[in-house]
Amino acid sequence: MKRVSILGATGSIGQNTIDLIRRAPERFDVVALTGGRNIDRLARDAIELGADVAVTAHDDLLVSLREALKGSAVEAAAGEAALVEAASRPAHWVMSAIVGAAGLPPGLAALEQGATLALANKESLVAAGPLLMRTARVNHARIIPVDSEHSAIFQALVGEDMAAVNRCIITASGGAFRDWPLEDLAGATPEQAATHPNWAMGQRITIDSASMFNKALEVIEAREFFGFRPEQIEVVIHPESMVHALVGFCDGGLMAHVGPPDMRHAIGYALNWPQRFDLPVEALDLVALGQLTFRAPDVARYPALRLAREVMERRGLTGAVFNAAKERALDHFIAHRLPFMGMAEVVEEVIARIEAENGLIDAGITLETVGQADHLARIAADQVVQDKY
Ligand code: NDP
Ligand code: MG
C-alpha cells in the first residue's frame, strides 16, 4: 500500500487526484488531506478515504471542521503550522496542490521527510526553486512534475542524456482572450478571463492562462526544475492543447508529448511513477482531430512572457517577488480594482521598486528570505494599485 497525502485536496487538482485514488482503493492508504474554506468537501473526502487527519488552512474553521468530522476517526486540525505538520507525517507520496506561495512550507516539509513530491504548485518553484531542489537532494526525496507541460518534458526525457538536450518548447492554449482584438483587452472582466477554451482548472490559474502569467511561471518552472537555460525555453501558441511540450536534441530530433487536455494523465503519471497503470483518460483520435496548429505568441498581448525572461536574468529572490506581485495583482483584478492589462504593469513596477529600494533581491534563498521578499512584494503591489489605478 502506498501511503499518500494530498495538500490542496479540495481544489481542482486535489479532486482529480482523489478521483484516481478512489478508483484503486486497494493500492492507497490516505494519511492527510488539506483544504482551505471548503470544509464540507474536505470532511466528506477525508471520511470516505479513511484519512488519518484533515486540515484546514484557516484557524477560524477548526470548529466547523470538527463538527463535520464528528463520529468519524479522522483527526481535525487547522492553521499553517498544522498544514506543515500534516505534510511531515510519513508518506511515500505527497501531492502539492495548494494554490499560490502558501504551498511552499508544506511542500518543503514533505520533502524533508523523504516523500516523493508530486508538484502541481508551480508557485513554490518560481519563488524558491533552488531551495526546493536542494531540499529534495539533501533528503534523497524526489519531485515529479504535475504541470502538464513539465510532466510532458519529464516523460520525453526518460532514458535521455541531458547533455544531448538543447531546447524545450512549451505550448500554450492562449487562454480566454486568444482571439480577442488587442484593444478589447482593456475592458476584459475577471468573469470573462475565468473561462478556459480547453482545460477545466481552478479560477486563479484559468485567469493566469488568459494573461499568460501561467506560461510565464511555467517558463521559470522549466528552468528551475530541469536546468534549461532561458534561451533554450520556447513558448508557442497551440490552440488545440493536444501537444503539451516538446524536447529537442542535438541531432535535430524532437520528442513531443501528445494527449487530450485531462490533468488526470499528468497526476496519474506522477502517482504511479516509475510504473504506468491504466488511467481514465480518453484515447486520442488523430484522424478525427485532423490537424494541430502552432503560432508565435504576440508579445504586445502577453507582457508576462517578457517579464519571465527578465526574472530569469535577475534570479535570486526576484522569482519570489514576481510570484507574490502576480498573486496580489490577480487579487486586485478579481476584485475589479485593476484592469486586465494592469496586472503586468503592477508586477513590473513592483520588481523595479523593490530592486531600487533594497538589496533583498540578491540575498540567499531560504524559507525566511523568500517569506520576506513575498511580504514586501505584496505590500508594494497594493501600493502601486493605490497610486496608479
Ligand atoms: P484550486 O483553486 O482549485 O484549489 C486550490 C487548493 O488550495 C484548494 O484545496 C484550496 O482550498 C487550497 N488553498 C487555497 N488557499 C490556500 C491557503 N492559503 N493555504 C492552504 N490551502 C489553500 O486550484 P487548482 O487545483 O487549479 O491549482 C492548484 C495548484 O496546481 C496551483 O499551484 C496551480 O497553478 C497548479 N496547477 C493546476 C492545474 C489545474 O489543472 N487546475 C494545472 C497545472 C498546475 P479551498 O478550495 O478549500 O479553499
Ligand atoms: Mg501547465
Image: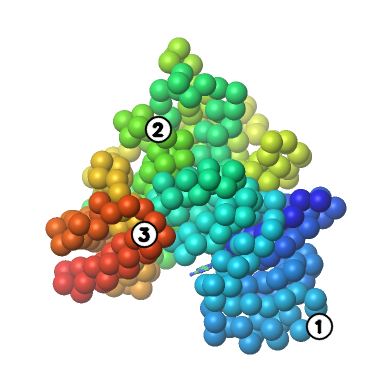
* Residue at the image position 69 percent from the left and 36 percent from the top: 274
Residue that label 1 marks: 71
Q: Quadrant of the C terminus?
A: bottom left
The dot on residue 228 is 2
Separation (CA) of disc 3 from disc 1 = 41 Å
Which tag, 3 or 1, sits closer to the chain's start?
A: 1
- Within 10 Å of disc 1 (Cα), the crowding (few <14, some 14-19, many 20+) is few
**In what element is the residue under mark 2?**
loop
Contact between labelled residues 1 and 2, with CB atoms less than 8 Å apart? no
User: Given the image, on which type of amino acid does mark 2 rest?
Assistant: Phe
- Within 10 Å of disc 2 (Cα), the crowding (few <14, some 14-19, many 20+) is some
Q: Is residue 187 above or below residue 135?
A: below
Give the left or right position of residue 271, taking residue 161 as reference. Answer: right
Does mark 2 have its CB less than 8 Å from ligand 2? no
> Which label sits in the foreground, 3 or 1?
3
Q: Quadrant of residue 356?
A: bottom left
Residue that label 3 marks: 370
